[in-house]
Amino acid sequence: MQQLSDRYSYYFWVGVFFIMMFGLLGLMYYSATNIDYVWRWYRIPQYFISNETIEIRSEIQGEVLSITEKSGMSTIVIQDEYSNDKETYTAPTKSVLISEGDFISMGDVLGTVKEVRAGIMLLGLWITLKVSIIAIIVGILIGLIGGLARISDNPALKWSAITYIELIRGSPLLVQIFIWYFVLGTLINTMLNNHGIPQVPPLWFGVAALSTFTGAYVAEMVRAGIQSIDKGQTEAARSLGLTYPQAMIHVIMPQALRRILPPLAGQFISLIKDSSLLGIIAIRELTKATREVVTSSLQPFELWFICALLYLILTFSLSMFAQYLERKAG
Amino acid sequence: MIRVTNINKTFYLPEPMKALNNISCHIKAGEVVVIIGPSGSGKSTLLRCLNRLEKPDPGGHILIDNIDIMSPKTNINKVRAELGMVFQSFNLFPHKTVLDNINLAQIIIRKRSKADTEKRSMELLEKVGIPDKAGVYPGNLSGGQQQRVAIARALAMDPKAMLFDEPTSALDPEMIGEVLDVMKTMAREGMTMVVVTHEMGFAREVADRVIFMDNGAIIEEGTPEHFFSNPTHDRTKLFLGQIL
């Protein structure tokens, strides 16, 4: 009898949970509608994917010499009336608005092409993904080297590592992003400019800031992982005759890396969210893209929910991947 | 084969603590030497100095096969490859199977082919009595089995001598026997062995010489017959009286 009422009690509270969730959602929707906010979810997809009509305009002024057609596409040749240079344009036959012999002014529309274009939000998502993946990989490399340097006996290695870790962990990521872009970025790009080498786009300073930031935390995790391995493991490996690097690679690091997978995954989940700060240096990642679209579409409610949901999908996928790795690693 | 001359070892805890006090001894090839003594007497420290897991204070010499491991010019890794060590806490590599544990050093240091390595590893597993556990991970073995794998792992390098640091002290009484049997077989086959242990039965049966240490010094040395029936020093007599 007790078991039966326990089960009913359990499902009752499960029901309470779902009612609470839907209640909150409903409350949100109702209050928005009450302030006359018009929900327009149908207007969101265009910011991800749209069918754009691109006009093909003439850049010169002159006469249409010929229009030749081949498998649905027309090649239009126009001769400049002053220089007698020829310009060639291609457009789908069905969209061509002019004929042979017509006089074309500069900027006239010759035809139109329909293209599937990625919207700003999708591009922003792509930039966030790209920046995060590169920063994770570089961050792991920096962290591995930093962690090993931190535990070395060599003062040059050890103190450099400590300085790096303390400086980076001691200041906010936002400030570091500014330093990378406005201080180091200006330095590097001015020097490159003086030597005639093309400038580095802001994206790479953003990636650098994220990577060095992550690297400091990963270095400490690597150190903790290595130091948590029983000294007996090193002793057994060294007493077999393995050198320090051999012992590290074959015995210590495999065990250490397995141990730090959970906090490491957490650090990378943070990284994906921290990438939202890069918008401050004109990198059009997801949050900045959302801000831009909100300004032009005036639909903050729908867009910000979508933005949060997209971050959630990214971090959740990473979390699932980390759990899979943990299972595989035993 | 192993010649220890005037070895001292001070630990800084941070107060200085003298663990070894002017130790000298000589272990010949093929000899089985058992070191016994109370806790804190320095037996494990002495053993660990032999493969430089502990660094003795400058001023003494330890010659392994005529190579002075106290000299900074010595490649200690090469010397260690000729000395097998078995630990009290086994120290098997948990992320590798039993076979891979035994294979590892052979492949990396002796640079043997995979086929030769596996053949040798399986031979050794048979010798220690557990060939069926080759694909198992150390976590799934009993203490006695783990220690036997550890012995096989050390033997895989074909060392000139084997060092045992209280090999049975962490084992259940039922499993001590199986490990001691393996060690007795090795002794019979002529392996040079230095064993730190509390197993007096093993010392009496197998040792060529017994060394008794107390407070960082060697108090008495002798054959098992002399040692157990007719000890000279009072300290030795006191110790034996308590444990026999």
Image (tube, coloured by chain):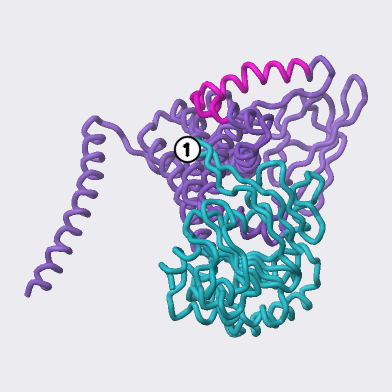
When the figure is inspected, residue A83 is found, relative to residue B227, above or below; the finding is above
Q: Which residue is mark 1?
A: A273
- x and y, in percent, of residue B205 in the image: 58, 80
Magenta extent: A165-191
At horizontal 50% and vertical 73% (from top left) the residue drawn is B199
Give the chain letter at badge 1. Answer: A
Quadrant into which the N terminus of chain A falls? bottom left
- Per the rendering, the colour in which chain B appears is cyan
At horizontal 47% and vertical 27% (from top left) the residue drawn is A296
- x and y, in percent, of residue B120 in the image: 73, 79
When the figure is inspected, residue B243 is found, relative to residue A41, above or below; the finding is below
- Per the rendering, the colour in which chain A appears is purple
Q: Secondary structure at mark 1?
A: helix
Q: Estimate how packed mark 1 is, as few (under 14), some (14 to 19) or many (20 or more) residues with alpha carbons within 10 Å.
A: some
**Foreground of the two, B125 or B176:** B176
**Foreground of the two, B90 or A195:** B90
When the figure is inspected, residue B181 is found, relative to residue A51, above or below; the finding is below
